[in-house]
């Protein structure tokens, strides 16, 4: 029987749990992406009994989360985590992912275009950023930044937004990445799931006009629609706050059997991916496997929704959240365990 921990209790092996959960959710959602719920049920049977595919292949969601994790590890091996110190490793990891033979899992167009530009070392990274894209490709991969111990709030926010900015420069992609990392961090530190939406809303309001110039440089100036960096980033936070409002409304009358996408969005864009993943997690905060199954059985971007859901559930419940027969055969298991062990230590 699953029981909830007391609020404020640090999660045991939160990083391993979150990274494993991200990959498990990704693998569960990989075969169901692009299908609606009736089509998924016809293939899998009852959603509460969904089995992890064999073999348990993941998508670019897990591949790029590992890239972010390795980049942060490299940067911190060289000293204090700062924007200039993180940019180079992120760029190197993203280009390595671009050219990998395993990059054959239907990756998002924004990531491909941006990474092709990042491969040109003559271009400043900001010229690669797709400033008009707020696809979920940035916050699906940001969970590692929420798990790194010892970061200040400013470092965590700056790093989360910077890793988004290299590919997805839209202010909503930046804010959603920041919020996703924040949610993972809070849960790993023992936050009460029932208070999570309220805490994320407060965080969004507090940071609504805070532009992290030391991390993002003059990214804001690449769009002509915003007269100041504060107004640029506020656009992103406002869209995320609207998504959190929809989530709060849905949770007032929760329906575990209804497709969460109907209330909080299909997850192709950043704020909806976060809101719907939170929706799935908060329907079953003490049942991580049920939460990722619910996320994988949705009409929207199932792999990304389930990957974020798995990261949230794993951060909350730790490595023991996942069935051994699942966690032992997930693709990239050794890479996930290596990063998890580093940060859990």
Image (spheres, rainbow, N blue to C red):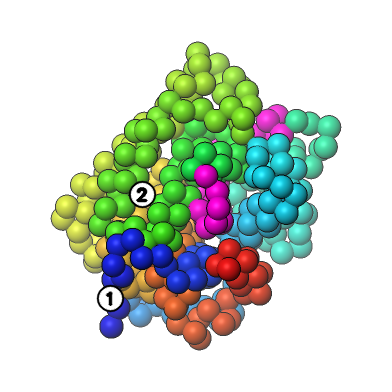
How many numbered circles does the render carry?
A: 2
Q: Are marks 1 and 2 in contact (CB under 8 Å)?
A: no
Quarter of the image containing the C terminus? bottom right
Q: Is residue 87 above or below residue 105?
A: above
- Categorize mark 1 by other alpha carbons within 10 Å: few (<14), some (14-19), many (20+): few
Magenta residues, start to end: 125-152
Q: Is residue 70 left or right of residue 283?
A: right
Q: Residue at x 20, y 47 (%)?
A: 249
Residue 203 shows which numbered tag? none
Residue 3 shows which numbered tag? 1
Image spot of residue 107 (x, y percent): 62, 54
Q: Is residue 111 left or right of residue 172?
A: right
Residue 114 in view: no
Q: Is residue 201 left or right of residue 94?
A: left
Q: Residue at x 56, y 82 (%)?
A: 328
Q: Is residue 269 above or below residue 106?
A: above
Q: Residue at x 68, y 61 (%)?
A: 104
> Of circles 1 and 2, which is in front?
1
Image spot of residue 190 (x, y percent): 37, 61
Query: Which residue is the site of mark 2?
Result: 275
Q: Is residue 263 magenta?
A: no
């Amino acid at each position: 029987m699953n029981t909830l921990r007391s609020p404020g209790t640090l999660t045991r092996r939160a990083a391993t749990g979150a990274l494993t959960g991200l990959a498990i959710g990704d693998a569960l959602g990989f075969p169901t992406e692009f299908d609606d719920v009736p089509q998924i049920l016809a293939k899998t049977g009852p959603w509460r009994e969904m089995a992890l595919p064999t073999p348990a292949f993941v998508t670019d969601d897990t591949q790029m989360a590992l890239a972010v994790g390795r980049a942060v590890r490299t940067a911190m091996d060289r000293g204090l985590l700062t924007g200039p110190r993180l940019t180079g490793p992120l760029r190197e990891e993203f280009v390595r992912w671009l050219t990998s033979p395993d990059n054959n899992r239907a990756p998002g167009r924004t990531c491909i275009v941006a990474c092709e530009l990042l491969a040109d070392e003559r271009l400043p990274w900001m010229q690669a950023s797709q400033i008009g894209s707020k696809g979920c490709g940035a916050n699906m991969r940001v969970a590692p930044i929420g798990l790194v111990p010892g970061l200040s709030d400013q470092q965590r926010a700056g790093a989360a937004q910077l890793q988004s900015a290299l590919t997805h420069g839209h202010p909503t992609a930046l804010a959603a990445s920041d919020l996703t990392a924040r949610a993972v961090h809070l849960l790993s530190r023992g936050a009460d799931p029932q208070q999570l939406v309220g805490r994320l809303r407060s965080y969004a309001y507090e940071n609504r006009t805070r532009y992290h110039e030391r991390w993002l440089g003059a990214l804001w100036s690449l769009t002509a629609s915003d007269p100041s960096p504060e107004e640029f980033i506020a656009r992103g936070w406002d869209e995320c706050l609207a998504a959190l409002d929809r989530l709060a409304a849905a949770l007032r009358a929760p329906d575990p059997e209804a497709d969460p996408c109907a209330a909080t969005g299909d997850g192709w864009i950043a704020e909806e991916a976060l809101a719907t993943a939170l929706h799935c997690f908060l329907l079953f905060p003490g049942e991580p496997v049920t939460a990722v199954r619910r996320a994988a059985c949705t009409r929207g971007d199932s792999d990304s929704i389930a990957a974020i859901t798995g990261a949230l559930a794993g951060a909350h419940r730790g490595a023991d959240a996942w069935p051994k027969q699942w966690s032992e055969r997930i693709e990239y298991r050794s890479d996930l365990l290596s990063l998890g062990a580093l940060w859990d230590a």
